[in-house]
Amino acid sequence: MPSGGTKTTIEPGLIARIAQGVRYAFGGPAPEAWFGPQQPMAPLVPEDQKPSVTGRQFDFPFAYNQRIKPRQEEPVSFEQMRALADGYDLLRLVIETRKDQMSKLRWCIKPRDRKAKDDSGCKAVADFLRFPDREHSWDDWLRMLLEDMLVIDAATLYARPTLGGDLYALEPIDGSTIKRVLDEHGRTPMAPDPAYQQILKGVPAIDYTRDELIYRPRNVRTHKVYGYSPVEQVIMTVNIALRRQAYQLSYYTEGNVPEALASVPKEWQPDQIRQFQEYWDTLLSGDMGQRRKLKFIPDGVNYKETKESPLKDTYDEWLARIVCFAFSVSPQPFVKETNRATASTAKEAELTEGLAPIMQWAKNMVDFVIAGQFKRPDLEFDWEEEESVDPLVQAQVMQIQVAAKIITPDEARADLGRDPMTPEEREAAFPAPPAPVVSAAPGEPDAPSAKPPAAKGKEALSKASKKALAGLDRPAAVDATEALKAVTSRLLKNQAPKIAAQVADLAGLEKALTMPGQSGGVRSPKKIDAILAGIDFGEWIDEFYDDAVDVLAGLAVDSGIEAMSALEVFGADEQALLRTDAIKWAEGRAAEMVGMRKTADGLIQNPNAKWQITEGTRGLIRADVTTALDEGWSSQELASALADSYAFSDERSETIARTEIARADVEGNTAGWRATGLVAEKEWLTAPECCDICDEMNGKTAPLDEDFEGGASMPLHPNCRCTALPVLKDQTEDQ
């Protein structure tokens, strides 16, 4: 302190606050700070018992294993779930539908190693599974397991052994009688300790180890002992539906809703009215339908017909949708149909997405049996996809495989159930080609000349590079682009007013637009989604598909011939193979553009189609539809707006045409290279002045019939002009 100054008092707590600030700067807030997290309580488990607690799955009830009844600690019992599944007809129909779909699927036993051949073990396991419990066929056996999986999620099998310890039968057991035993960590004990108890007559009857009982819930959870079945997930919905059905049943059985009311003299007392009502009812005794006709009321009350509510309304449909959703089954039979496209898509999704998880569950269960009971982990259960094969498609596939030397002609004949060719048949089918004649120099005799050999190495790549760089600028590609643009433009111009009319009908434009912007009203996002999803693009298929196939196939064939010419391959067989592949690709791609898939039976809905004109249109018109609902447009105003929008413009038609012709050029190249048998891979060639994303792909290679890394393919984006170069087999062999 300077001489003559005054003493300055340090503020109380200043040093403590400074120290606290330093600690905060380096270590964050202290546990003991005001309203801080504080120090955790010390664990109460004694040290010698910590091993039994460490890693415990969940906080199960004390003395859980002492409880006798299965699911005793759960609010919903097995018996309740089964009663609901049997008592609600819609739920039962859905369950039986899933069982029917699963039981008719074909399956096989095969080695896990795709290169390994089937051995006797495959046949032995397959023969066993045809009657797994020695009583029921595979279909009936599977239906029993599915019943317990779908209703109570407790599918159970008893592996009955022979006297020698081998597997004798896989016997289904009522899963509702099985009580799980927990070890100290909340998990299933390992053998030889009991893992399950079967409760019979209300008492523990017998213990099973993990090796003796196969207990396979599908929806297992970390905090629960038992599974969570689809029935339990919709238990509230099912309860509501049952009560609505009981109410509707009373309409017919009890006669408790009068159809009409009638007045009595005003001087009558309530007792007199009651007496007369009893007299009237006595006259109609035994006929409940007649008792509903008339009820008497005091004078002064006018005659009134009671309006009955509909026996099935939108709420009943909503209940049906919830139940069907829980089982991934299409609600189409129980609700009003929207349109053909939506119904077809929902039906296909049911069979693909809905069945897949159940099929995987069944496969995992059988694989577990094969590995554990048959001691064959090298074998697996597999579902066979049963698809009808078009004979023409089958012949084309075999032709490709023979040409690519994947199989021999005799192997192809064996697949068709035919004997190998005799030498005479082979000579007749594959005659030696005559040597072509070329003109000799003047004064020299004509001499045969061999077919020009395929160009090799740098020479072939040089020719292919020149073709690739000029691919989309050559006259054939330019003409194809203009042709596809014309087809697409005609489609969009014709469909713009039709789409507007559909939207107006789905949204009720002239009616419901008195509440623009109201939450939950006509412009809610869910409402917009429903309107857009309801648009039917069925006419687009008829108007676009055939013309698009012609343009795409023509350009793909032309591109393939150019690619083959660059490699100096001119054979008629190769060109025929190219044309087959190009046409097949064009048919598939044209179908995808309108949201369909080409099959042997025709075109079907394809929810996974890539780069769809139809789905793109839904997204592009969303803004106009939203504005129309907000501002109360008429259908004519919406039609005018859509006609002037990008969704139906010539600019969009040109973008689609340029992109798809680029795709056809690449696919044609690939088909041509495949037909030559000289190309092993393809190399990405970025177009000049392309985007950064495409530039990153330049020079990367991929197998001829596979995508590039990350699933990239050409075109990578709209208006992409990237193409591919061939990587010859002799080059890959040299590397």
Image (cartoon, rainbow, N blue to C red):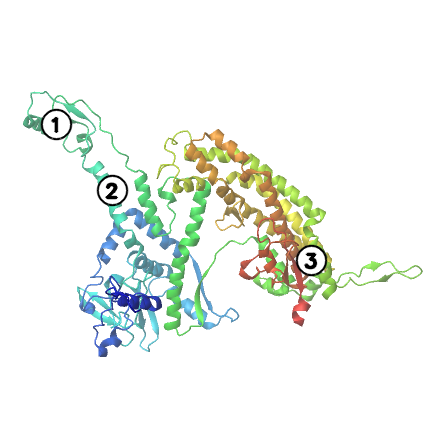
**Other-residue count near label 2 (Cα within 10 Å), few / some / many at <14 / 14–19 / ≥20:** some
Residues marked 2 and 3 touching at CB (< 8 Å): no
Q: Secondary structure at mark 3?
A: helix
Amino acid type, label 3: Glu
Query: Quadrant of the rendered structure where residue 437 is?
Result: bottom right
- Left or right of 36, for residue 528: right
Earlier in the chain: of badge 3 and badge 1, it is 1
Circle 2 is placed at which residue position? 244
Q: Nearer the viewer, residue 183 or 43?
A: 43
- Left or right of 289, for residue 588: right
Q: Secondary structure at mark 2?
A: helix
Q: Residue at (45%, 29%) from the top-left corner?
A: 634
Screen quadrant of the N terminus: bottom left
Amino acid type, label 1: Trp
Circle 1 is placed at which residue position? 280
Question: What's the CA distance linking mark 2 and mark 1?
Answer: 30 Å
Earlier in the chain: of badge 2 and badge 3, it is 2
